[in-house]
Image (cartoon, rainbow, N blue to C red):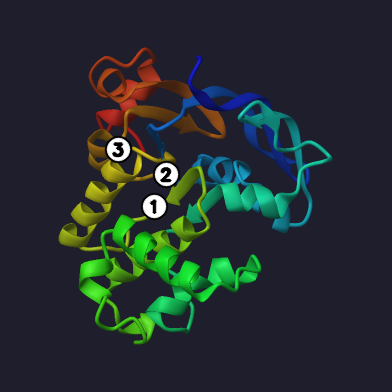
Amino acid sequence: MKDSKIKVNGFNLFYGSVQAIKNINLTIRANSVTGIIGPSGCGKSTFLRSLNRMNDVIGNVRTEGRVEIDAENIYGKEIDVVDLRRKVGMVFQKSNPFPKSIFENVAYGLRINGIRDRNYIQQKVEKSLQDSALWNEVKDRLNSSAFDLSGGQQQRLCIARALAVEPEILLMDEPASALDPTATLKIEELIHELKKNYTIIIVTHNMQQAARVSDFTAFFMLGELIEIGLTSTIFTKPGKKMTEDYITGRFG
């Protein structure tokens, strides 16, 4: 695939002697949204965290195979994990703003990367808040605590914080699962806008959400990738019976 951003070949992941991810092979296109679905405990989040090596922080983790981003193996010995995580941003299930102002939450990544230019920081904070569809709601209270925001606003703030350091890929782990339907819709609309500039992979337990926001959908079961394809195909004419059984609610 000529516009592929991520290529995963023969990827296995073990927690000690337990194999959590089994022989994953897939390709993810640039500027697309790939949804990962499957029952709880099937390895969706573990696989997602493999794409920016967040699993490294857990002791006793071992991997095999290759995960390439722009044709570079991110598990190679020469890889700087800090650089990798700058390139591959992450938004978690529970919004986790820092106990700082709205402005400082977004500026945080810039400051820890050594940027001191006030004008630059100001511009990046504004642009990131605009890109996360939050600017108009917070522009008059940037010095207020991030904890004053609603749950949906806090999640968009976390997205702004991830965008500020200019990643190329955005990983989202159940980003709307704790939100009400209105806030969820805003996040979904935002994902649709963001894919113009970012490659997005979203783990979701909500199949309707996967159908709405994803260009491609991957179905995981017990650490294995059962099937991946165009979302329209996966949801209407899946190639595997297990996929069909899951999507039609026969298990899961």
In the image, farthest residue toward the bottom? 144
Q: Are marks 1 and 2 in contact (CB under 8 Å)?
A: yes
Q: Which mark is residue 145?
A: none
| Element type at mark 3 | helix
- For the point 84% across and 40% down, the residue is 77
Please provide percent x and percent y for residue 127. Answer: 36, 60
Residue at 21% x, 55% y: name it: 186
Question: Pointer 2: what residue?
Answer: 203
Say what amino acid the circle numbered 1 marks: Glu
How far apart marks 1 and 2 lie (CA) works out to 5 Å
The residue that disc 3 covers is 210
Left or right: 145 in relation to 83: left
- First in sequence: mark 2 vs mark 3: 2
Quadrant for the C terminus, please. Answer: top left
SS category of the residue bearing label 1: loop
Numbered label attached to residue 174:
1
Identify the residue at image location x=44%, y=51%.
Answer: 173
Disc 2 on helix, strand or loop? strand
Residue 118 in the image, given as x and y percentages of width and height: 51, 75
**Which three-letter amino acid code belongs to the residue tagged 3?**
Ala
Q: Give the Cα distance between marks 3 and 1.
A: 11 Å
Crowding near the residue tagged with mark 1, few <14, some 14–19, many ≥20 C-alpha atoms within 10 Å: some
Crowding at dot 2, Cα within 10 Å, few <14 / some 14-19 / many 20+, comes out as: many
* Rendered position, 174 above or below 108: above
Residue 50's spot in the image, x, y percent?
62, 42
Q: Quadrant of residue 144?
A: bottom left
